Amino acid sequence: MSIIPTQLATTNNTTVKTALQTESVISKTPLGSTPSSISTITTAEYSTGKDVVTVLTLNALAGAAASLGIGNIVYTFPAGQHLELVYGFSNLSLTAAGTAVNADVGLGSVVASGAVSVLSGTATFENRLTGQTIATDPAGGAAASALLGATGTGISLNVAGSVKNVFLNAAGGWNANNVGSLTASGVITLKWTIMNA
């Protein structure tokens, strides 16, 4: 079993004196990347020149019986230094054949693996966005959303030698009839700041 990902546009409104005015935001070629082998993720980035919001839209990102941690890469930050500020899930839904499972889902710097039913046993499985409980369903489980500010330590203070990969990970006590792929649909948002000179 493997995980599969689904876009979003955001406007930032600011008040200037008595008028409501839309802040200038540049939509551009993404600084980071998603592996070319994964065609089910659409990437959009919005930047003020230094601050960046990366929006990953998942269209069925593919991710077994028994407790198992699984995952898939969804994004790679560019080389250099950056500060990760906020991570978010919006309307993230999981689809899997068979009996529903309350999966533990998070964003990490390493792909989840091994006989685990939760991500918390290995810090790097969820060191960006800690595990959220999201139920699977053959027709797509109830959509879940989460927003988490980075801690300002560890992986979020991302220097040149830090891990740049972002993985969408899930773990659960899978049933014998949970055959095939676990798929994820929804939006992942990463807010970060370029720290290079």
Image: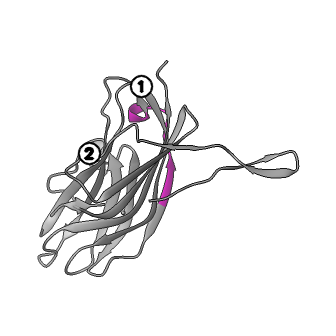
Q: Earlier in the sequence, mark 2 or mark 1?
A: 1
Q: Residues within 10 Å of mark 2 (few under 14, many from 20)?
A: some
Q: Nearer the viewer, residue 140 or 108?
A: 140
Residue 48 visible here: yes
Q: Vertically, is 99 above or below 197?
A: below
Q: Position of residue 69 (x, y in %)?
A: 20, 56
- Residue at image coords 42%, 60%: 187
Q: Residue furthest right?
A: 18
Give the spatial CA distance, label 2 vs label 1. 25 Å
- Residue at image coords 31%, 65%: 184
Q: Position of residue 70 (x, y in %)?
A: 20, 56
Which numbered marker is on residue 133? Answer: none
Q: Secondary structure at mark 2?
A: loop
* Span highlighted in magenta in the image: 146-156
Q: Quadrant of the rendered structure where residue 1 is?
A: bottom left
Which numbered marker is on residue 122? Answer: 2
Q: Nearer the viewer, residue 126 or 96?
A: 96
Residue 117 visible here: no
- Residue at image coords 87%, 45%: 17
Q: Vertically, is 29 above or below 63?
A: above
Quick check: 53 left or right of 59? right
Which numbered marker is on residue 81? Answer: 1
Amino acid carrying label 1: it is: Gln
Q: Secondary structure at mark 1?
A: loop
Q: Residue furthest top?
A: 197
Q: Position of residue 109 (x, y in %)?
A: 30, 41
Amino acid carrying label 2: it is: Thr
Does the magenta run of residues contain 88?
no
Q: Position of residue 197 (x, y in %)?
A: 49, 18
Q: Quadrant of the rendered structure where residue 142 is?
A: bottom left
